[in-house]
Image: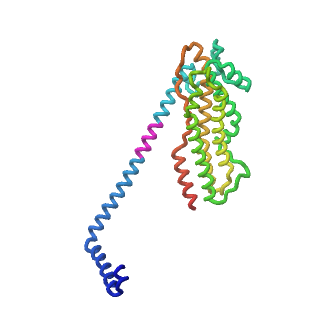
Amino acid sequence: MAARRESGGGGGIAGVLGVLFVLGVVIKYIWWIVGIAAVIGVSIAVYHVSQAALRRAEERRELAERHEEELRLRAERQRRWTLLGDSRAVYGEDGAGPTRAIVSPEATSDLSVARIAATPAERAALMRDRPRAWQHALFASVLQHRTAAMVPRLRDSELGFTTANGIRISSGAHLASHLTGLIDEMLMTTQQLSHFMNSPGFMAAFGDAASTTDAAALEQIAHRVADYAERLLELSERCRALSPPSRHTALVTDCARLLDMPLQGYRAFVTEYVDVVDALPRALDHARGSINLGSIALDMEVDDALFARTQRRLAALSQS
């Protein structure tokens, strides 16, 4: 092209010769090029296969770690039931109910152990008198009170109940944008709750120095945990308030299921925490010093397969 700018005739011949030269190289070494292309193709294929294998290995590792953590928590729960004399340790969760119906709970002589407070006056007494394990009783009391107020809404979320005269969504891309935003807010909220419950201030509120613990701060911490749960519930309600075209109803249903999963984890956490506090008078009746009852996990995991399938459908819908 440079020669063409300098001299019209010579440049044209040089240009043609240049093209012919390139063609000549292609013709002469065509099998080499095909061979090289094949090697590159195989290399790319091997790379993608290896990447897929690495991803599968990573997924298996994460699944194994999660399974191991679940086993650890189940073992700690079983040990806690045994220490607390809970009939579920012997008869299991299904058999414990009938057993409790015919066996009256043992009375305890230790009236200094904190119990769940059912009223604001009882919570105030916990904060003032500070009996043994009062921090756990106060935390559980606030969570139980706040959760009880949300129970009808939590049931609707679990059932996937949709409201009448919902927000009409006519465009697939608009629906995908709405649902993607709700799922992203759910993931962000669960991360915020995780950071909150692992913060130094949260941990310090349950320290050994019960006499110096700020009771008002502990009560506020419990309310903030419940606030996060209420945010998650509002996301579920916003999803179930959408009224899409009938062909997209199943997608909204799947998104509602995803948004309800952290709420199921929250309810299970509150139930287990309250159970432990209710059993503390039996555990501490004759105990001296501290006892280790293991961990109670707030598990807000979502179904990986459902999440991946929903994400794929949302991505396809947003491009339609």
**Which quadrant of the rendered structure holds the C terminus?**
bottom right
Asked if 219 appears above or below 254 in the picture, the reply is above
Q: Position of residue 250 (x, y in %)?
A: 61, 52
The number of discs equals 0
The percent coordinates of residue 14 (x first, y second) are 31, 82
Horizontal side, residue 11 vs residue 318: left or right? left
Residue 250 shows in the view: no
Res 218 → quadrant: top right
Asked whether residue 243 appears in the rendered view, the answer is yes
How is the rendered protein coloured? rainbow
Magenta stretch encompasses residue 93? no
**Front residue of 195 and 302:** 195
The residue shown at (59%, 32%) is: 269
Residue at 57%, 12% (x, y): give it.
286
**Which residue is pictured at 68% across the width and 53% down the height?**
243
Return the residue found at the far bottom: 9
Can you tell which quarter of the image residue 260 is in? Answer: top right
Residue 102 shown left or right of residue 66 in the figure:
right
Would you identify the image quadrant in which residue 156 lies?
top right
Q: In which quadrant will I find the N terminus? A: bottom left
Q: Nearer the viewer, residue 94 or 274?
A: 274
Residue at 35% from the left image edge and 55% from the top image edge: 46
Percent from the top left, x then y, of residue 165?
Answer: 73, 52
> Does 134 sit left or right of 296 as displayed?
right
SS assignment for the magenta stretch, majority: helix
**Magenta residues, as a range?**
56-66
Q: Residue furthest left?
A: 28
Above or below: residue 292 compared with residue 53: above
